[in-house]
Amino acid sequence: MWALVSLLSLLALYARGIVIPSLQSHDVSVPPDSINPYPGKPRLLFKKDGTFKITVFSDLHFGENPWDDWGPEQDVNSTILMNAVLADEKPDYVVLNGDLITGENTFRENSTSLIDEIMKPLNAAKIPFSSTHGNHDNQANITHEEEIQRELKVAPLSYTRMAPKGVGGTEGPGNYWVPIYRDAKDLAPILVLWFFDSRGGFSPNPDSVPVPDWVDESVAGWIESESQAMEKAWGPAELRGALAFVHIPPHAIQVLQTNLDSDKNPGLNDDILGDGSVQDSSAQGEDIPFWDALNSNVKNLHAIISGHDHGNEWCAREFTKDVIFCFDKHSGYGGYSSAGWGHGVRNLVFHTPDPKAGVETWIRLQEGDTRARITLDDNYGR
């Protein structure tokens, strides 16, 4: 039965001109839907015209200076931006890519209530979404786990979840993936969105200490085991496209900044990468297991996307792994900024479910202006 369903799904893909490689490693005894992590939620689907649009809000930094008028005013401005962008862009999916809250400024007794404010525009627009978390989301008065738990409580269309116990290391529970399907009849997804927890910040009171600022080594084994489970249930990884989101950029991308070309790598380049700006800034190789596992196991990886460095918007190809990296756009009015940077989002549009086709991406500013429009495909950055 499952073999017949898989065959019918593949024939449908062929009919749309999507070339699928051999399925020799597909274990037809494993039901394709057996590893769906969201059996109680609506399936996330490409539109009938074959498109799928993702809008990324990054570094919202809610909760700054709650003891005066300035801080709450920034939250109001950030909410206005979210409402305007969601109304104009009408994305199929939203990603909140870390530093939702400036946790060191919040009060312990009401820190998670800021999540309610961030969720309101998404709940009102009825748009499904996922979150990653950053170094400012781990602080003496807040943790990644507390933010995730609150989000799941107040946002019905959140697809954020926590990794199995033992995966993610100290204060790094937010490692998970989300399947996107070509249509409602398919049991295997055509796109997988991966989300990783780069940790950082500080552990909670009363004995707050620094938290490592890289994706924990335990995540590497989890990527491998999840990828193997996907192949058993869905066939080879080449059948699916992928995008990866992590708040702090992997260390390997730091060197890319020295060779940027404003024509090939358009967008702001105002944050010099160095200490604290990438994972494991001391270059001890702590994030290498994650970096290697991601690029070895996840095929058709269109890009790895990070926030954290508010003055950068560029994309570039990292040649040792032959993978594209992109920065987000600083969305929130909280957090550091500079004159002329503006606030906005990164948009990504799949124009076809073909897992090997390019993905169009650009920066959209609050007022509607756009810049740095490129296509993430095999030709980009070469």
Image (cartoon, helix red, strand yellow):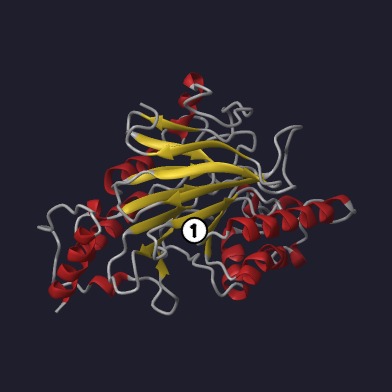
Res 144 visible: yes
Residue marked by disc 1: 174
Q: Is residue 356 left or right of residue 269?
A: left
Count every numbered label the image shows and give the total: 1
- Residue 49: image quadrant is bottom left
Rendering coords of residue 168 (x, y %): 45, 55
Rendering coords of residue 329 (x, y %): 61, 42
Observer-nearest of 222 and 366: 366
**Amino acid type for the residue under numbered disc 1:** Gly
Q: Is residue 271 left or right of residue 193?
A: right
Res 328 visible: no
Rendering coords of residue 38 (x, y %): 41, 73
Screen quadrant of the C terminus:
top left
**In percent of the image, x 36 and y 36: which residue is there?**
323
**In percent of the image, x 65 and y 41: which residue is there?**
369
**In percent of the image, x 88 and y 55: which residue is there?**
67
Q: Is residue 265 above or below residue 178?
A: above
Q: Is residue 283 above or below residue 202?
A: above
Residue projecting furthest to the right: 68
Q: Is residue 192 left or right of residue 237?
A: right
**In percent of the image, x 43 and y 62: which residue is there?**
163
Observer-nearest of 288 and 371: 371
Rendering coords of residue 370 (x, y %): 61, 40
- Residue 91: image quadrant is bottom right
